[in-house]
Image: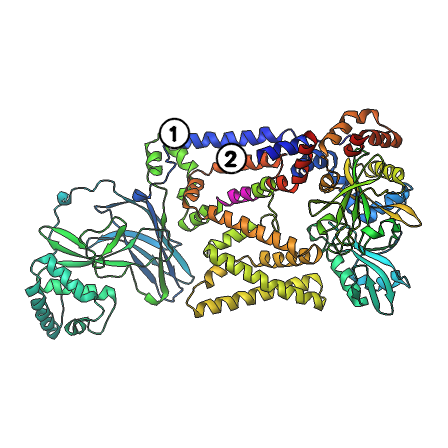
Amino acid sequence: MFSRLKKLKEAGVVGINSRNLEYIAEHNPRKLYPLADNKIRTKLIAKEAGISVPELYGVVSSVGEAKKLKQILGSRREFVIKPSQGCGGEGIVVVSDVRDNEIETVARETLSFSDLEHHVANILHGLFSLGSRPDKAMIEYRVRFDPIFDDISSRGVPDIRIVSFLGVPVMAMLRLPTLASGGKANLHQGAIGAGVDIATGRTLSGVWYDSVVMHHPDSQANITGRQIPHWNKLLELAAKSYQLTGLGYQGVDIVLDEELGPMLLELNTRPGLAVQIANQAGLKKRLVKVEQNISSLNSIEEKVNFSISSFASQKESASD
Amino acid sequence: MAHNRRSTGAVPVAILSILAGLVVLLFHYYKLNVPLVPDYSTASWLVEAKINVQPVNDKSSVTLFLPQITKTHSIENEQFVSDGFGLATISERGNRVARWTNGISTGNYNLFYRALVRPKEELTAKSSQATKRPSTLNVFTKTEIKKVARQLNKKVWRENKGQKKFTEALCQLALTEKLDESFIKLLEGRDSSRYRLEVVTKLLAEEKIPARLVHGVTLSRAQANIPVTHWLEIFSEGQWHTYDPNLKSWDLSKDKFVWWKGEDKLIVTNNPAAVKTVISVSPGEAAGVRAAIQKSKLKEQAAGFLSLSSLPVHTQAVFRQMLIIPFGALLVAFLRNVVGLKTFGTFMPVLIALSFRELQLAWGLLLFSSIVTLGLIARFYFEKLKLLLVPRLTATLTLVIIFMIAITLIADHFNHSIALSLAFFPLVILTMTIERMSVVWEEVGAREALKQGIGSLAVASVIYFLVTNAYLEYLFFVFPELLLIVLGLAILLGRYKGYRLIELFRFKELASVEQSRQS
């Protein structure tokens, strides 16, 4: 037990308590939380800053506006409904097709329009928000993910999580939905997280339910060594998010649209720690390195370059 | 943008709080000699008689017998709560009584008598006081009954010679299941264990042996509405000898406390139908605590420190249980932040543990799991009905109560009296647990929902053992300054940056990585 404790310390693994006290409490002022927790606000400030985001079709803010849902949807056949302040990916419904009164979701469920209305009502009553506070339902563009990862993601949209510290991307993973996660890209719901070499944007091994995996459990396809397109652009996006919100320690979730390219999906004030297992590396050393050098890193470019030169995967650099 | 809000104040504040707690604790312990371990063998007891007087149109008068200092017990700190009644304490035929009177009795009144009873450490010599032989004896009045009594006495005396043996035999006769026919005649149509003993005193009086009833309570554990026990005394060789007919012993055990003597009931009143009496006892501070205060020069201040002991018995009972709750909450914090167990809601396990206290742990776990299981099934059904959140919670809450009624009725059928204990189950907590669990179940999966459910019950079980621990209860009640230490530890725990025990397993892959690279 103590030897493992020592090894984890040596590997620089950050635990939940350390993350909460030394990074979140220190660098994320509570008054800034709404910028990340409220996805409508995130979208607005990102759009203002010229960052590409999935288009917001409309917002339902009260039960009385139930009719508005039909109005917003119009004749759209694909869209996403989600709570604006949901946590842990709960309450998100991704609709892939609408035929007559049959609504098909990516999780292969067939819903009726009244099912959808009920789901929106649940969102409004705060079933999925932190502390059960009343919430708003947002209806937005369904991202058409670049098909390059189709063989290693089941049903849903994969996304890329980049942990950014003071604007420096420190660690990243490609989150791949599985059958177990119901098409969702959240790790604790059963998605796979594949570590990404910060320097190159190529995937390393993956983590599934806290264990290291090399293959997707559904398709058995290899998840390692896959190149994420537009990698430098993604790193820039992660670096910009700090200026956007002022949150020093955040998880930046990005999706790759087939036509529209990288889009900022949401920001996370309490990014999970499984990213360390995916990358087979602890966060601590990287975070310390950023703290030591942050005073000389001013522009987005400097931060991205520092990240690329400092945080190349040790496995790849070892084989060089 | 520098958002550094380093909270360096936490550790000093925590240490200050712990030190303050320790200083008061050491002061209590060394200066006042308050013992760290309770000695219940010579502990004092708080006894309380609560008399409820219903409104009557007549003048009310209530007479309550008061306990007296005896060979075995002393009585201190008597308090009377008169609620507008006039009060007089008088001595009457060897008893002390309190008489409450009220000219106009329109409302519902509560009268209290409260005293601290302390067993004497050394018994004073038996013949220290010469007692006069009582002049009047309580005898049978009807001649035909007298005749039956004499015959019975003759028969019993023949086989049991000697006053004590004779008394023992009569008591045995009186308390057997199948009563002797002549004894039934002596009862003259009345029957109660108390009256049977009264008949024994009359039988003894027929033989010119002075005898009387003695009434009191057993001081063994905190109990509200404690029943009165009856014993017998006979006068022989210049003094009274007490006999416990249930234990067949001429020595009243130390936990038996004599309240009053004679043929009267505890309460004598002109409106018996309108007066209800409840006697409660609870452990006072253990032996030594009070002695410590009395020995101390700082008597006044010390009494202030220990003011919890001077509270009314009912309030004390509440505090006894309340003071230990922060300790339970501290344990939740520890199990969550240092061990890493997941629970539904932060303090839900504490509330569950408190409700388990009224049941037994196994029963509590069984009932809790079955209600939550039934609730989950109902909740999954409600999901299909598509109800709005708050009405759905209302429906779940209603069903939870229906389940509880059903379980109580079933248990009652098998003679399990869990009805009262179930009333302590936190309904709202149960309902919210069902709701949260079903959301986690659907959104994340059964695995996570069960993990958190079992985690909650595990934490609740650990806390159950804490809050039911009599020694901990004593410690926190006598040394409430321990709360300062709990406060300090909670603040320290709030700054704990180390790994959680569970993370050692969660990040096992990372530990092996480092090893393989080094080798």
Of helix, strand and loop, which one carries label 1? helix
Provide the residue designation for mark 2. B485
Q: Residues within 10 Å of mark 1 (few under 14, many from 20)?
A: few
Q: Was residue A26 drawn as part of the magenta stretch in this picture? A: no
Q: Earlier in the sequence, mark 2 or mark 1?
A: 1
Q: Where does residue A317 sit, x and y in percent of width and height? A: 80, 31
Quadrant in the rendering for residue B445? bottom right
Q: Amino acid at mark 1?
A: Tyr
- Residue B273, compared with residue A14, is above or below; it is below
Of helix, strand and loop, which one carries label 2? helix
Q: Where does residue A125 sit, x and y in percent of width and height? A: 73, 58
Q: Where does residue B78 sit, x and y in percent of width and height? A: 32, 46
Q: Which mark is residue A24?
A: none
Residue nearer the viewer, B416 or A2: A2
- Residue B476, compared with residue B461, is above or below; it is above
Q: Are marks 2 and 1 in contact (CB under 8 Å)?
A: no
Quadrant of the image containing the C terminus of chain A: top right
Quadrant in the rendering for residue A232? top right
Q: Residues within 10 Å of mark 2 (few under 14, many from 20)?
A: many
Residue displayed at 50% across by 47% down: B462
Q: Was residue B330 drawn as part of the magenta stretch in this picture? A: yes
Segment tinted magenta in the rendering = B323-332
